[in-house]
Amino acid sequence: MQLTPLSRLFTSLCLALFLPLVAVTALKAQDSQSYGALTLHGSIPSSEPYSNVAKFGGGLGFDGANFIHPLFGIAYHVGVNINPYNRSNTNFGLNVGANDDTQPWVNANLMLGGELSYPITPAIAPEFRALAGLMVARAPQVKYGTLGEIEADIAPAFGYSIGGGLKFINNEGASAIRIGIQYQAANPKFSRNTSIVGIGTGAVEGKQKIDMLSIYVSFAFLSRK
């Protein structure tokens, strides 16, 4: 697994954010609470292979964690992300015109992993999450006017994400607002049929790296003590 310089910087920042939690485990504070959360996020391609074909997008998901220890919980994520096709991309030297039909990139994710979190005050709890699982991605159909097209294809792949942020817990401890950033990546292999002026010309096969940085905001329902 090779991360881009931007992704390595992001990982370092996440670790730096969470390291103070280790120091406060000896302090008296309430334990982390299990939660489920509805999450909205905006995502931007984080490396050239994906930014060549996709633009800024966003999605919706459901996140949560079941804390089996004051510091550690089993975390999960189920969600969908959509990124518009980058019309400045060229395939076979053909530019996608503004009036041509291009669909978005779509990926659905089901991931499981761990979350480290510990309230440093009754109202603030940093979190760090690392998950892995299944990504099912759809490469879009792209048309070049009457010249030809590349058909859509759906492919599964192993995916992973790392991220961190803060939970802002309400006074009653029943809910929280989560804000943070995460990196997500997968390498699905697509096989997309191509045609020129309606005549099939074979298939374009190969892996397409899908990686993105996301800013997330979510509303979490916390378990009762």
Image (tube, rainbow, N blue to C red):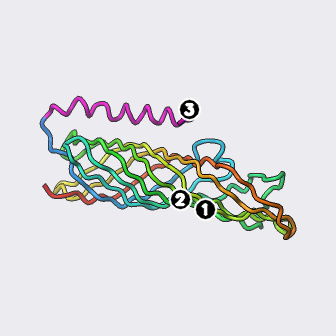
What secondary structure characterizes most of the magenta part? Answer: helix
Mark 3 vs mark 2: which is more N-terminal?
3
Placement of the C terminus among the 4 image quadrants:
bottom left
- Helix or strand or loop: what does disc 3 sit on? helix
Foreground mark, 3 or 1, reads: 1
Mark 3 vs mark 1: which is more N-terminal?
3
Few, some or many residues within 10 Å of mark 3 (<14, 14–19, 20+):
few
Q: CA distance from mark 3 to mark 1?
A: 29 Å
Mark 1 vs mark 2: which is more N-terminal?
2
Quadrant of the rendered image containing residue 13: top left
Q: Amino acid at mark 2?
A: Val
- Helix or strand or loop: what does disc 1 sit on? strand
Identity of the residue drawn at 82% across and 67% down: 145
The answer to whether marks 3 and 2 mark residues whose Cβ atoms lie closer than 8 Å is no
Identity of the residue drawn at 12% across and 36% down: 28
Residue annotated with mark 1: 154
Q: CA distance from mark 3 to mark 2?
A: 26 Å
- Determine whether, in the image, residue 98 is placed left or right of residue 130: right
Q: Amino acid at mark 3?
A: Pro
Depth check: give the residue in front, 47 or 72: 72
In the rendered structure, find residue 136 and report the number of the disc placed on it. Answer: 2
- x, y (%) of residue 70? 19, 43
Identity of the residue drawn at 72% across and 57% down: 87
The span picked out in magenta is: 1-27
- x, y (%) of residue 69? 20, 43
- Helix or strand or loop: what does disc 2 sit on? strand
In the rendered structure, find residue 42 and report the number of the disc placed on it. Answer: none
The answer to whether marks 1 and 2 mark residues whose Cβ atoms lie closer than 8 Å is yes
